[in-house]
């Protein structure tokens, strides 16, 4: 292949190819009968190596030294170029996503666009104060796209900034739910914890009619998935939220938390609510019966700590049947359990 054809197809000018030749980087294997340079496949491979190493930031002098090394590995060069390309594509993809988010806002004036760009950059700032301010600003006027703010919420590691961002995101109501739900499947424990808290904030602060059935179902499904999480904080958090929602799916997990912690008091209150609010028949009544049965089983535990935590649940439940249960614990061999049970009975009788 002649130099003109190589230049046309490779994008490396004939002048640059001659320059490479003058430096000894490339030496055409053959010449035609007319004396023109003729490049073989190996020569073209050499051009690729030179251009590839230049893309990696090496000088021509460094490239000459490296290509002269018998240990030079062309395969490694290709792998490094591939990694560089992946990083560049990731940056370009992120830029594209930002542009699309801004486009979806349909801002008509330059001032609004500039404010949006500034807030989006601030949310990604390494300065937590800037992230905090950006979150508060976006919550007031909805300037930052929900997708961008959701990503910032999921990845925020500083407590105060995370709280501000969750508040700002909650102002968008159901629109953010689908982005946060994806965070519940993230490999990062921190992201999953942030997703759980943000979903709960939206659930608590958004009116049911505004939230809508689709977002509500998505939140519930995300919480159900959280019950099987490998992280104890996510599991217990999901169970407590479901308990507040009156979802019986969480009962087994709440019993475990009530007996072993952490947040045993909150779990005790949630379990008591299932019993207190259960009708005389139906599924809720069956759930209440199961809870009381499990409490009696745990009351036979050889560990005083477990028996005391059974008492913590019973304290929250009124009724003569429960009073009888507490009376049994007032004769417990543990002084702490017995004293607490006795004091509880006396307080109930006084009222």
Image (spheres, grey):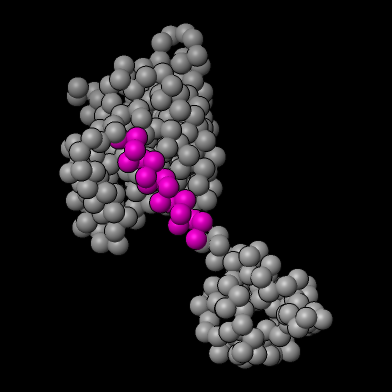
Identify which residue is drawn at 45% across, 36% down: 181
Task: Please tell me whether residue 4 is drawn above or below residue 271 in the rendered image.
Answer: below
Query: The magenta stretch spans which residues?
Result: 88-105
Residue 169 placement: quadrant: top left
Left or right: residue 100 versus residue 287 is: left
Task: Please tell me whether residue 43 is drawn above or below residue 117 in the rendered image.
Answer: below
Q: 186 or 62: nearer the eye?
A: 62
Q: Magenta segment: does it hold 100? A: yes
| Residue 334 visible in the snapshot | no
Assign the N terminus to one quadrant of the image.
bottom right
Q: Residue furthest top?
A: 281
Q: Residue furthest front?
A: 34
Residue 207 placement: quadrant: top left
Residue 14 placement: quadrant: bottom right
Task: Please tell me whether residue 2 is drawn above or below residue 120 in the rendered image.
Answer: below
Left or right: residue 223 versus residue 128 is: right
Query: Residue 11, position in %: x, y?
Result: 59, 66
Q: 80 or 317: nearer the eye?
A: 80
Is most of the magenta stretch helix, strand or loop? helix
Q: Magenta segment: does it hold 323? A: no
| Residue 28 visible in the snapshot | yes
Q: 246 or 222: nearer the eye?
A: 222
Identify which residue is drawn at 22% across, 56% down: 130
Left or right: residue 192 versus residue 323 is: right
Query: Residue 72, position in %: x, y?
Result: 70, 84
Left or right: residue 41 versus residue 11 is: right
Identify which residue is drawn at 71% across, 85% down: 27
Query: Residue 62, position in %: x, y?
Result: 56, 88
Identify which residue is drawn at 24% across, 23% down: 349
Assign the C terminus to one quadrant of the image.
top left
Q: Residue furthest right?
A: 33
Q: How many marks?
A: 0
């Amino acid at each position: 292949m002649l130099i003109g054809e190589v230049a046309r197809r490779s994008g490396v000018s004939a002048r640059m190819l001659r320059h490479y030749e003058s430096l000894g980087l490339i030496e055409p294997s053959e010449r035609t009968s007319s004396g023109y340079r003729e490049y073989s496949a190996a020569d073209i491979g050499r051009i690729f190596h030179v251009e590839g190493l230049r893309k990696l930031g090496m000088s021509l002098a460094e490239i000459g030294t490296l290509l002269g090394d018998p240990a030079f590995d062309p395969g490694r060069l290709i792998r490094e170029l591939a990694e560089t390309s992946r990083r560049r594509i990731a940056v370009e993809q992120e830029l594209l996503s930002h542009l699309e988010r801004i486009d979806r806002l349909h801002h008509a004036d330059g001032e609004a666009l500039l404010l949006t760009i500034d807030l989006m950059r601030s949310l990604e700032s390494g300065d937590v104060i800037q992230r905090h301010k950006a979150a508060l600003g976006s919550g007031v006027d909805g300037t930052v796209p929900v997708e961008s703010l959701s990503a910032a919420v999921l990845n925020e590691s500083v407590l105060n900034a995370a709280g501000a961002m969750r508040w700002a995101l909650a102002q968008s109501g159901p629109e953010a739910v689908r982005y946060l739900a994806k965070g519940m499947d993230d490999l990062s424990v921190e992201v999953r914890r942030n997703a759980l808290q943000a979903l709960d904030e939206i659930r608590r602060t958004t009116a049911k009619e505004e939230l809508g059935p689709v977002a509500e179902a998505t939140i519930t499904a995300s919480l159900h998935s959280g019950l099987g999480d490998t992280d104890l904080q996510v599991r217990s958090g999901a169970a407590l939220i479901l308990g507040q929602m009156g979802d019986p799916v969480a009962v087994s997990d709440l019993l475990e938390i009530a007996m072993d912690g952490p947040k045993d008091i909150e779990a005790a209150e949630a379990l008591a609510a299932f019993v207190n609010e259960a009708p005389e028949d139906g599924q809720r009544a069956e759930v209440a019966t199961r809870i009381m049965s499990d409490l009696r089983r745990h009351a036979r535990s050889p560990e005083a700590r477990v028996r005391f935590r059974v008492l913590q649940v019973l304290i929250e439940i009124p009724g003569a049947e429960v009073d009888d249960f507490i009376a049994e614990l007032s004769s417990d061999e543990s002084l702490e359990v017995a004293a607490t049970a006795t004091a509880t009975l006396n307080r109930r009788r006084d009222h």
